[in-house]
Image (tube, helix red, strand yellow):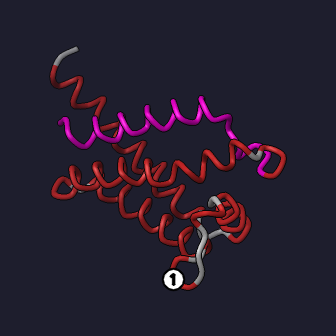
Amino acid sequence: MSPESMTNVLTVLRIVLAVVFVGAGISHFAPGVQRTMAAMIPPRLRSHGWLSPKNLVIFTGLCEIAGGVGLLVEATRVTSGVALAVFLVAVFPANAYAARHKERFGAVAIPFVPRLLGQLVLIGLVLAVSLVG
């Protein structure tokens, strides 16, 4: 693949990832999604006040929106990509908790191994589009 083709592929992938992250971030503000995501936070990580599950869901939504937009701005691309990779690691405990409680979370409870592999692929893609090209 030529360097120009690779740049074009990375640009398209960067835009797709940005749209996915912004869309996912916006979904954090829908009441039903917010309740489900708040319930996914493992009990040992739940708190009150500023760190309440609802506030954490709002915060993670804002992080996804900012990270997605940041991927599209050349000056913030690398920082946003690294921050999104850290974000994906930070939210994984909630996904793992949901995977262990399929009866409670239904379709959201993607089995642990596929979810882990998907998360690793997503981290790799985010880093690739932010660090290369």
Residue 123: within the magenta? yes
- Which quadrant is home to the C terminus? top left
Q: Is residue 21 rendered to the left or right of residue 113? A: left
- Which quadrant is home to the N terminus? top left
Residue at image position (48%, 38%) is 119
Res 62 → quadrant: bottom left
Residue nearest the observer in this picture, 101 or 118: 101
> Farthest residue toward the right?
103
Which x, y percent locates residue 107?
A: 75, 43
Which x, y percent locates residue 28?
A: 59, 65
Residue 1: within the magenta? no
Res 47 → quadrant: bottom right
Q: Does 14 sit above or below residue 7?
A: below
Extent of the magenta region: 105-133
Q: To which residue does mark 1 refer?
A: 50
Which x, y percent locates residue 43?
A: 66, 63
Q: Magenta part mainly helix, strand or loop?
A: helix
Tell me which amino acid carries mark 1: Trp
